[in-house]
Image: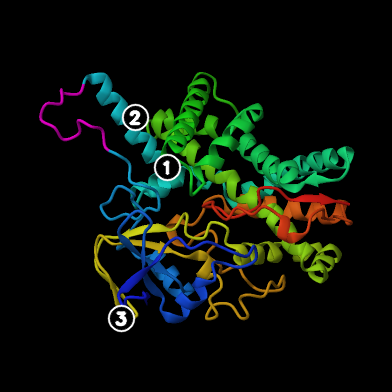
Amino acid sequence: MTEIDSNGSVRELSFPMARRCPFAPPPEYERLRADSPLVRVQLPHGGTAWVVTRHAEAQQLLTDPRVSSDANRPGFPSVRPPQEPPADEGTSSAEPLTAEQLTELAEIAQFHEGQFINLDPPRHGHYRRMLISEFGARQMNELRPEVQRITDRLVDDMLAKGSPADLVEDLGLPLSSLVICRLLGVPYEDHEYFQSATRTLVQLDAEPEQLKAAMEGLIDFLDELVKAAVREPGDNLIGRLINEQVGSGELTRAALVGMAFLLLTAGHEATANMLPLGMLTLLEHPRQLAELRENPALLPGAVDELLRFHSVSDWAAFDRVATEDIEIDGRKIMAGEGIFVLSASANRDERAFERPDTFDIHRKARHHIAFGYGVHQCIGQNLARAELEIGLGTLLRRIPALRLDKPMDELPFKYQNFVFGLHAMPVRW
């Protein structure tokens, strides 16, 4: 979709577009979705990309083999400023790389391999298969008692301290952090460090130097953790991958660091945001909240409706590039053009969901794409659902008088982050 400026010239719409309401996607999405399933937009640092606005076409493109997740491909879209290449790159006077430098470059490449979210099949499947057994429905059901114990301890602490409390700092962040630390084998005393680093990584307006420092620091931290685990593997995900995959030569140590980086950063950020945001939504819909309290069996469906309703990651994990020409609805994505799938728009598509702007815990919403779709669908979705069901269910059961401690319009929302949520949510009871 294009717009006409005051001079009569055609211009592309700027992307990304900001949310302006905690319970709705950017208001432009509805207009874009009505216009076309495929809209060209202007990126903040030059160039254009396509955004996918409707549910069916989002599923179609997320499973199309002509669409790549490889961020190293030419044309892959980004909302970040382009990185400056080294000053001597490409010059004939550059000295040959030493063996040590070549080894370091190989390790960096392997680190990025481990972040398999940015790989295409079959390389993507090579790494994903190593984790399927760790995040399956059965394994997550076995983990639920531990998630419940962690949640109860955190709620115990909230009640002992007394109101007011901050549902972000006192429950959302520590619950997701404790669970992912337990799974990976990361010492929980280090959680404040990686929480701080991941906060920087998901800020749209973070300076390049801040991003570089946060990423390098977290990589070094995880590298030391993996080195220690190689010497003495524990009974945790990293330990099992060392015993079963690194030991067999299927996985390098550097790739394991990349895998741990992906799981740690992705494994707590979305849930940490969704839990307070979900509780806020229920507080704003008291009849449905009361119904959930009376009938906890409705919680799994309510969680999927919350995931659909908010779609907190929106386009952040759904950036792609076309490897061949693709035609949709009379518009052609050319090979080498970037694509962003707007999950927050697709999940409000009237063609896929009746009255999509209404929050309804009775909705059959499992076909939402908040976790993506196809081979790249989030591997941790069963864990996220378990944490949200247990976290929200425990609050409903144990603190029935929970309420906001500030007016809604005074709450600090993360409008400038890749992942939407709350900076703080003061509550009392």
Instruction: For residue 146, say whether it is visible.
Output: no
Badge 2 density bin: few <14, some 14–19, many ≥20, Cα 10 Å: some
**Which of the marked residues, 1 or 2, is nearer the chain's N terminus?**
2
Residue denoted by label 1: 115
Q: Of the residues tagged 2 and 3, which is closer to the observer?
A: 3
Q: Which residues are magenta?
A: 85-97
Residue denoted by label 2: 107
Q: CA distance from mark 2 to mark 3?
A: 44 Å
Tell me residue 198's x, y (percent).
54, 40
**Which of the marked residues, 2 or 3, is nearer the chain's N terminus?**
2
Residue flagged by tag 1: what amino acid is it?
Answer: Gln
Residue 382, compared with residue 356, is above or below; it is: above
Residue denoted by label 3: 330
- The image's colouring method is rainbow
Q: Of the residues tagged 1 and 3, which is closer to the observer?
A: 3
Q: Residue at x 45, y 71 (%)?
A: 53
**Which of the marked residues, 1 or 3, is nearer the chain's N terminus?**
1
Q: Is residue 95 magenta?
A: yes
Image quarter where the N terminus lies is: bottom left
Residue 100 is left or right of residue 220, and the answer is left
Tell me residue 340's x, y (percent).
41, 62
Q: Is residue 387 magenta?
A: no
Q: Nearer the viewer, residue 192 or 177?
A: 192
Residue 107, compared with residue 264, is above or below; it is: above
Residue flagged by tag 2: what amino acid is it?
Answer: Glu
Q: Residue at x 25, y 67 (%)?
A: 334
